[in-house]
Amino acid sequence: MGNQTDSNSRDTIGTCTFPADIPIPFFIRRKKESEKFGLKLNIQKTKIMASGPITSWEIDGETMGTVSEFIFLGFKITADVDCSHEIKRCLLLGRKVMTNLDSTLKSRDITLPTQGRLVKAMVFPVVMYGCESWTVKKAERRRIDAFELWC
């Protein structure tokens, strides 16, 4: 590879760090260690999410911007740690699965118990994936219950 910059997204390594203050030397050290192996850390593409008033960081004369939300391992993480967007997104994905299964579920060849098993096996896992990390409020609880009754 030499001193080439690899901007291929499948080769990008993401890091999710949760402490409030990430020291700037961490990024400088990571940049220097990457250069030892011929990799160049692109600071302009590197973003941080801060819960405080940080608008940008400058490392070696390059500016690193901030984001208010990002998707990590399939989940949307926001600066205000609000799960309502993620719950709505999962419910919409479940609704999409239900509409895709609509013709199958309305078929007279499939018995009612089999239809129930199909919904439990194909719809609920899509909706409930990652639900262990949700902070569910009353409004979201009502939405989840309504979706369950709709199925």
Image: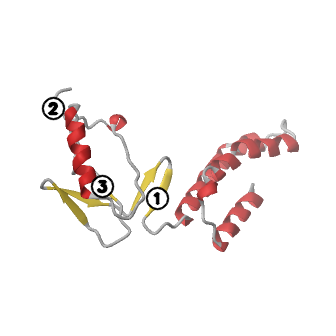
Q: Amino acid at mark 3?
A: Lys
Q: Residue at x 63, y 71 (%)?
A: 137
Callout 3 secondary element: strand
Q: Nearer the viewer, residue 86 or 118?
A: 86
Callout 1 secondary element: strand
Question: What label sits on residue 3 in the rendered view?
Answer: 2
Q: Nearer the viewer, residue 140 or 78?
A: 78
- Pointer 1 with pointer 3, Cβ within 8 A: no
Q: Residue at x 22, y 61 (%)?
A: 57
Q: Nearer the viewer, residue 69 or 50?
A: 50
- Pointer 3 with pointer 2, Cβ within 8 A: no
Residue 95: give x, y in percent of width and height: 64, 53
Q: Amino acid at mark 1?
A: Ile
Of pointers 3 and 2, the one earlier in the residue sequence:
2
The residue that label 1 is drawn on is 77
Q: How is the image coloured?
A: secondary structure
Q: Is residue 54 left or right of residue 63?
A: right
Q: Is residue 53 left or right of residue 101?
A: left
Q: Residues within 10 Å of mark 1 (few under 14, many from 20)?
A: some
Task: Indicate the quadrant where residue 68 lies.
Answer: bottom left
Q: Nearer the viewer, residue 137 or 19?
A: 19
Quadrant into which the C terminus falls:
bottom right
Q: Residue at x 23, y 35 (%)?
A: 39
Residue 7: give x, y in percent of width and height: 26, 38
Residue 99: give x, y in percent of width and height: 66, 48
Image height of 110 relative to 86, above or below: above
Q: Residues within 10 Å of mark 2 (few under 14, many from 20)?
A: few
Question: What label sits on residue 47 in the rendered view?
Answer: 3
The nearer-to-camera label among 1 and 2 is 2
Q: Cα distance, mark 1 to mark 2?
A: 33 Å
Question: What label sits on residue 16 in the rendered view?
Answer: none
Q: Amino acid at mark 2?
A: Asn
